[in-house]
Amino acid sequence: MATLFQGVGAVTPFSASSSLDSNKLLLPSRKSLSISDSRGSIFVYRSDALNLKAATRLQLSPGHQKRSPSEDLLLHQSRGSFGAFGLYLHCLRIAYPWHELLLFEALREGLEEEMERDPRVCVMGEDVGHYGGSYKVTKGLAEKYGDLRVLDTPIAENSFTGMGIGAAMTGLRPIVEGMNMGFLLLAFNQISNNCGMLHYTSGGQFTIPIVIRGPGGVGRQLGAEHSQRLESYFQSIPGIQMVACSTPYNAKGLMKAAIRSENPVILFEHVLLYNLKERIPDEEYVLSLEEAEMVRPGEHITILTYSRMRYHVMQAAKTLVNKGYDPEVIDIRSLKPFDLYTIGCSVKKTHRVLIVEECMRTGGIGASLTAAITENFHDYLDAPIVCLSSQDVPTPYAGTLEEWTVVQPAQIVSAVEQLCQ
Amino acid sequence: MALSRIASSSHASNLLKPLSTALSIRRLISSDSTVPLTIETSLPFISHKCDAPPRAVDTSASELFSFFRDMATMRRMEIAADSLYKAKLIRGFCHLYDGQEAVAIGMEAAITKKDAIITAYRDHCTFIGRGGTLLEVFGELMGRICGGSKGKGGSMHFYRKQTNFFGGHGIVGAQIPLGCGLAFAQRYSKEENVTFTLYGDGAANQGQLFEALNMAALWDLPAILVCENNHYGMGTAEWRAAKNPAYYKRGDYVPGLKVDGMDVLAVKQACKFAKENALKNGPLILEMDTYRYHGHSMSDPGSTYRTRDEISGVRQERDPIERVRKLLLAHDIASEKELKDIEKQVRKDVDDAIAKAKECPMPDPSELFTNVYVKGLGVESFGADRKEVRATLP
């Protein structure tokens, strides 16, 4: 049942000439249909160059190694109006130039564009310079911008995070990379006391336009210490903003928005999502840091999720749709503050909420979100909010055990069935 | 001059003033003269992996005079803060700097306002040195809106962006990596300025210090780490906390200098030397051998871990203000009376500032939510260009 994501690039050949290939599956997000609003925010998800039936078959067979994670986003079948709509999107796609890349490349593109645009933007972290970044996010940047702008730091998270904050106080815009989010626990004092609070305690004199980013979440048998979800620990710190990216499109947009923001932003990436492939627009775009993303509009139930769980939810959505349910899936993206506007509109429509997250049960993002929704939208709820989160255990090494610490699509399906009774 | 000494009452002195000026022996140096003076520091510098600067310090009469006035202001301010704390007008933590004034003043004399200073929580006097006013200090200490951080920071959070004073930090040692970040930014922007990162002997045992030192030395950052060694880390003496209390040597590959922190001229010389050195060779450690008369904070009497004899002994022999007073008198720059007048004036200034700060209002409750985020409260959803507000989240 574990969905093992692997690099699509390594898996299937992508034929560049097949731009009009009818096998291509085009999956728009409803919100993006208004072109005037979000230019080029139409998502295009690529199949494994197989036909739909084959793709469906692949999806339901567990343990299939070489599969594109983007297949989990197939829901066109339920939509019915695919044919005409697909043609419409084909036309749009021709009108708007796109290029395809992996999530870490999208992050790098966003980073590079911002470094080009503003000479104050600099990167610091372990192995970001000459090595190119442990997840290749900063590959090639040190050669281009020099060692001072893409700084290889010693393994001293507390002090290089502090250094980044000190530099930010003077007006530089550093991006501090934690090789794994878990290591940033060592820098917690700097992040909490200095990063979050300096703007307040100095009476507004200093701004800290720093971006702290890194991969977190449960990976592939990485062990307990390297599978931590730090969103829950950081969420109470006043003064910081937290966002979690999940697709190459929003990774690039959020990276750019985070760099341009005057507030300290923590950008949570996920270890398993770095090799997601997607087509993103060629033109420059910046996303909003405080907005949630409507992944799949629906009527019966609101499913709130973020980061990797988005894909589990979409996979479960496929099953749910076959069973006749119509879930509305929202990728909350902004973990602090919550986009209660989008969430509220959704709750008012569906009256049922399911939160699916990878955070721990106790004190996690889901717990806060549950509280926030209950406080604000209590009257609109027909059923208690159900929150599916990871088990409150250190992530075990054994593969089967690790699967069970994280929420799986089958659990999501049964939770929805129970809620919608 | 002799006549003016006899006249002790102010009324009498007013009468005698014109007489005394007529009859007085013309002073060798007047108090506002900028004629250079060279004075030797009382103790030699002890160096580690570098050449010690010369003991002869270039100064001038006006500079010495300003030292006296500024240090007297700082001393008076700290004593006044003591009484305000006991009167419960200042709450929470209050860490007083009296005894250590020479470090703040000497450092200011050697550098410009473009150089950055960052220190820990014993920051009232450093803030004054960087151009803060007495009103801002007392306003902040009493939590009023006229305070330096609008009453939201408190004793441990004084900042002054325009003169590059970066605070004011409550967590021991956390300011050291920040200081290296400031130095990094200076190197990044290719400014010819340095950063003085102050910490205490207690913080000298923190790992972050060595991490930051390693990075500063690796990248030749213009960071000068100044250990204000007042020999007690909170309530623990340095010999009980540090295996090697020679803090200037603990940088290992980083050159260090041990300075008599109670001698303002020695501090000035050392800081000048450090600035020149840091711009060329990278980081440096300065250990200022100083002393605080008060306890660690106002909740610490300061006498449980050291004897009163020790405190009074230091006050008699090494007090920074007394030292400058003796210099001023010895070089005939000012008279005893003038110095006393200055102290009276300082006392008046401090009292005025306190009175004014007391009248200042407390911050409005709406101020609770300002300055948490830079734009709005973080509960507004902005468009992609981050300029227009799309929705206000409930």
Image (cartoon, coloured by chain):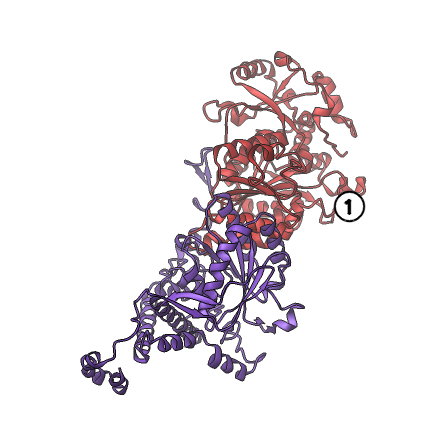
Chain colours: A red, B purple
Above-or-below relation of B282 to B343: above
Q: Residue at x 53, y 16 (%)?
A: A92
Task: Give the left or right position of residue B215, taking residue B62 as reference.
Answer: right
Q: Which residue is drawn at 54% across and 35% down?
A: A254
Q: Residue at x 55, y 44 (%)?
A: A373
The residue carrying mark 1 is: A396
Quadrant assignment, res B250: bottom right
Answer whether residue A289 is visible to the viewer in this image.
no
Above-or-below relation of B384 to B147: above
Nearest the eye: B183 or A94: B183
Query: For the view shown, which residue lies furthest in the bottom direction?
Result: B6
Q: Which quarter of the image is occupied by the N terminus of chain B?
A: bottom left
- In x, y percent, where is residue A261? 48, 40
- In x, y percent, where is residue A234? 59, 49
Nearest the eye: A312 or A147: A147
Above-or-below relation of A33 to A402: above
Answer whether residue A82 is visible to the viewer in this image.
yes
- In x, y percent, where is residue B134? 36, 65
Question: Which secondary structure lies at badge 1?
Answer: loop
**Dot 1 amino acid type:** Pro
